[in-house]
Amino acid sequence: MRVQKSSIANRFRGFLPVVIDLETGGFNPETDALLEVATIIIKMDDSGEIAPGEKLFFNVHPFDGANIEQSSLDFTGIDPYNPLRRAVSENDALAEIFRAIRTEIRHTDCQRAIMVAHNASFDLSFINAVSERCSLKRNPFHPFSTLDTVSLSGLAFGQTVLARACETAGIAFNKKEAHSAIYDCEKTAEIFCHVVNKWRGLTNFCS
């Protein structure tokens, strides 16, 4: 898919949409471990249609002293200390993700990234907390604005649960693969692109 430079910047007011999904050891970004992080950078073709682009995924090693709730592990099925995970540090995971996003921001003439996520305030709170904990500079995401697929799915399909929104939209969803960061990130990207492209077709939005 060929990218038309600055079209996506025009469509989203200078913001580059980047889909994020996390799996964590709890709900508190200050104390609970980040265990998985996946990102998908959204691309736009010459016709103005958007689609999922570059993917990045990391298993993440819990930071020293991190809290991990057993209920979270039971829900996700993650074994944080399994060596086969080939987990990396929070710093290495986010540094690599931030580099890829900043490269695409420059390529598309965007000003910064905007997070797309399902229940985006949760994911943004963890990304901001990890970024601060690791003293990472130049966090590419807007510090508080997001594009939340919960709201978009509620508007478009009358559904706020990701699996049900996908099913209503005609997007395949395998519940056995759900609750892994990469799978949920892929489905969040698909539902976001579906809604944005459908809206463009209904309104003749010119990018």
Image (spheres, rainbow, N blue to C red):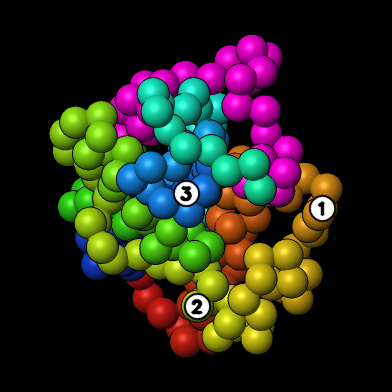
> On screen, 69 above or below 205?
above
Mark-to-mark CA distance, 2 and 3: 16 Å
Residue ID for mark 1: 174
Mark-to-mark CA distance, 3 and 1: 19 Å
Q: Earlier in the sequence, mark 1 or mark 2?
A: 2
Q: Earlier in the sequence, mark 3 or mark 1?
A: 3
Q: Amino acid at mark 3?
A: Ile
Marks 1,2: beta carbons within 8 A: no
Residue ID for mark 2: 151
Q: Amino acid at mark 2?
A: Ser
* Residues rendered magenta in the picture: 72-99
Residue 102 falls in which quadrant of the image? top left
Give the residue displayed 24% in from the left and 44% down from the top: 140
Residue 195 falls in which quadrant of the image? bottom right
Q: Position of residue 194 (x, y in %)?
A: 60, 67
> On screen, 206 above or below 6?
below
Give the residue displayed 55% in from the left and 27% down from the top: 59
For label 3, count other residues whose C-alpha is less than 10 Å away and answer few (under 14), some (14-19) or many (20+). many
Q: Nearer the viewer, residue 202 or 63?
A: 63
SS state under label 3: strand
Q: Position of residue 54 (x, y in %)?
A: 49, 37
On the rendered image, what quadrant is the C terminus found in?
bottom left
Q: Earlier in the sequence, mark 2 or mark 3?
A: 3
For the stretch drawn in magenta, the main secondary structure is helix
Residue ID for mark 3: 20
Q: Amino acid at mark 1?
A: Asn
